Image: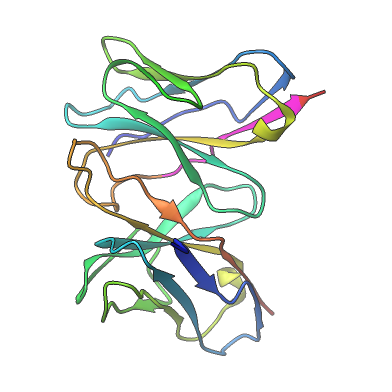
Amino acid sequence: LAKTTQPISMDSYEGQEVNITCSHNNIATNDYITWYQQFPSQGPRFIIQGYKTKVTNEVASLFIPADRKSSTLSLPRVSLSDTAVYYCLVGDRVGANNLFFGTGTRLTVIP
Amino acid sequence: NAGVTQTPKFQVLKTGQSMTLQCAQDMNHEYMSWYRQDPGMGLRLIHYSVGAGITDQGEVPNGYNVSRSTTEDFPLRLLSAAPSQTSVYFCASSSPELAGGPDTQYFGPGTRLTVL
């Protein structure tokens, strides 16, 4: 199972774009990259998922280079409400049991 | 839809007591999982189920039992509570993504358990 490495914490000012990078050097051919967001005292919430190149939705963008050994979650113009822990997961489609949450990146948005 | 619900929200136990954490989902999802989250840590998988009558162990199964008699419910039982089981417990459900890729997991609000 692919392991992931993320920065432990990041600070950003309101209105800035935030990029959180995740390393997954041992990613397998069938693995996808998924990001979850967790607010204090809540369960994680799905943000975005991708396999290669770029994926964009109403919340974020996910950039995946050709070698897929890393990925970058991009949050445009963050607000105070984006303060949360962000988890990068790598796994394939076989069930819900093979996605491992690491310690995540604690993003703090500063006014 | 209520999504994934968990009860109770908070619980305090004494060492050696047993209890059941309840989890229910109304999305007709096949897969359900239990995670624990310790302070400052990520989530660790305890047990999971890929359908009614089928369960399997995750990363940290010791001290916990599960059963899945219906699609909707997936209770987690602590047989003899220990202080090391003090944690926040999250239940999640998901369905296979027809378009490929891992399932999107939907998490409940969590149960905060303290074992004295």
Q: For the view shown, which residue lies furthest in the right direction?
A: A111
Q: Position of residue B79 (x, y in %)?
A: 45, 85
Q: Magenta span has A56?
A: no
Q: Position of residue B11 (x, y in %)?
A: 64, 78
Of the pair B100 and A7, the residue shown nearer to us? B100
Q: Is residue B17 left or right of residue A15?
A: left
Residue B50 occupies quadrant: bottom left
**Residue under the point 32% across and 18% down:** A69
Q: For the view shown, which residue lies furthest in the top direction?
A: A66
Q: Is residue B112 left or right of residue B97?
A: right
Give the answer, above or below, for where B14 lies relative to A36. below
- Range of magenta residues: A101-109
Q: Quadrant of the N terminus of chain A?
A: top left
**Residue under the point 45% across and 63% down:** B4
Q: Quadrant of the C terminus of chain A?
A: top right
**Residue under the point 36% across and 34% down:** A3
Give the answer, above or below, for where A32 lies relative to B54. above
Display colour scheme = rainbow
Q: Position of residue B3 (x, y in %)?
A: 44, 61
Q: Position of residue A96 (x, y in %)?
A: 29, 52
Q: For the view shown, which residue lies furthest in the front direction?
A: B1
Residue B71 occupies quadrant: bottom left
How many marks overall? 0
Give the answer, above or below, for where B77 lies relative to B103. below
Q: Is residue B12 left or right of residue B17?
A: right
